[in-house]
Image (tube, rainbow, N blue to C red):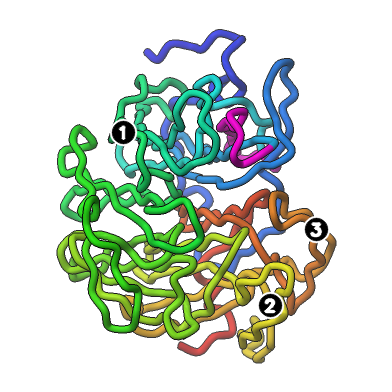
Amino acid sequence: MTPVPEPTAPRWARDVSQENFDWTAQSGDKPFFARPIPFVLAPVDEGEPFGKHNHQPSITWLPNGDLLAIWYSTGREQGTELTVLASRLRPGADAWDASSEFFKAPNRNMHGSSIFHDGEDTIYHFNGMAPNGGQGWAKLALLIRTSLDNGVTWTPPQAVDARLIGRHQVISGTLLTNDGALIQNCDAVPGGNGGTALHISRDGGRTWTDPGEGKTKPKFTQGATGEGTIAGIHAKVIELKDGRLLALGRGDSINGHMPMSLSADLGKTWTYKASPFPPIGGGQRLVLRRLQEGALLLVSFTSGNRAKPESVNMTFTDKSGEELTGHGMFAAVSFDEGETWPVRKLLTPGAGDWNGGAWTQEFTATPTRAEHAGYLAATQTPDSVIHLISSRLHYRFNLPWLREGVSD
């Protein structure tokens, strides 16, 4: 029997069911899109930290039906006050719990987090940690811990790599390959260009390798190949059906487009080419994942200039099949392993004034204008609902809604 946490436990560890949730009770194949709700909510318990800047989230579903989101909260991104908070959305609830502190070492910048449920028993949490008193995220240790009880209790943090070096800024997007390789993506540099590293474990997280460490920095140009580093920071990685890895990232643009990287040897070498999508920039991070239905999903932004979201036009299809020119956050779906992306839909609530938090702040939604920035993360629950979070808002929709009105 799982011990019951003391009443003084952080809010995310209280009153957590350990019963497996029946996802079939709410599954369906009708188009679904819900009005966004905030997941970043201020604490209500005395003594809990909450900075003015809440950013870089990660999200996963849990066996008991909860969603668990984590993110960092701080006054300055470089500061040692930066800490990691968490919140739950419980089954049937229409609002997230108030936040509480999730992971913190005193006087250290805890930059970069990812949380991931392997679909079986284990929830993984990866986090960066700067040296005592160190400012920023140029030199971080890379830590891992796990939970077997829906995120209530966690193993003591262990080092994936205890060295305070680059290539350790954790990015949401942990991947488990079909043959059991556990992969954590991390920025390879502290700046806006320079690529993404992969840390790979073939033994369930006990030992790790970085195929790109010590290698010459690649040239991210059309058709070039490089060793061990993906083009673009904040990159997301998925496994293709033939076992290759495909990644899309921010910065390191190729011919004016978002860079795409492909590897046939689990990240040892990569081939680079231009994707069909516009590049993104500061205050933005994409999502790339395989859906339960088998298709690939990309969520990104039409313009990398968050101050001028209408500087790049993209064409989308509405639910009636009519084409429209739109701006901001969009979804694209591929049914042929990333060769083509016939479904492209603007992810907008359609109306209203919203606060996207962090670098996004306030925006007005219309049928042709969506949130213009945000650090995106996503999970898909067993009922096929896609849960997408930006820097503050939680969107919910499904593949039938994305395909609505699209002839593919």
Residue 241 magenta-highlighted: no
Callout 3: helix, strand or loop?
strand
Residue highlighted by disc 3: 362
Would you place residue 63 above or below residue 286 in this image? above
In this view, the mark in front (1 or 3): 1
Q: Quadrant of the C terminus?
A: bottom left
Quadrant of image for the N terminus: top left
Residue at x 48%, y 61% (from the top left corner): 287
Decide which of 246, 281 is in the foreground and name it.
Answer: 281
* Percent coordinates x, y for residue 160 in the rendering: 28, 34
The magenta span reads: 76-95
Q: Would you identify the image quadrant in which residue 78 lies? A: top right
Instruction: Identify the residue at image location x=37%, y=74%.
Output: 260
Whole-percent x, y for residue 165 in the image: 35, 40
Instruction: Please name whichever residue, 64 or 202, is drawn nearer the observer in this view of the structure.
Output: 202
Q: Nearer the viewer, mark 1 or mark 2?
A: 1
Give the labeled residue for mark 2.
Answer: 327
In whole angstroms, how far apart are the C-alphas of marks 1 and 3? Answer: 39 Å
- Kind of residue at badge 3: Glu
Q: Answer whether residue 61 is visible to the viewer in this image.
A: no
Name the residue tied to disc 1.
163
On residue 50, which mark appears? Answer: none
Q: Is residue 26 visible?
A: yes
Residue type at tag 2: His
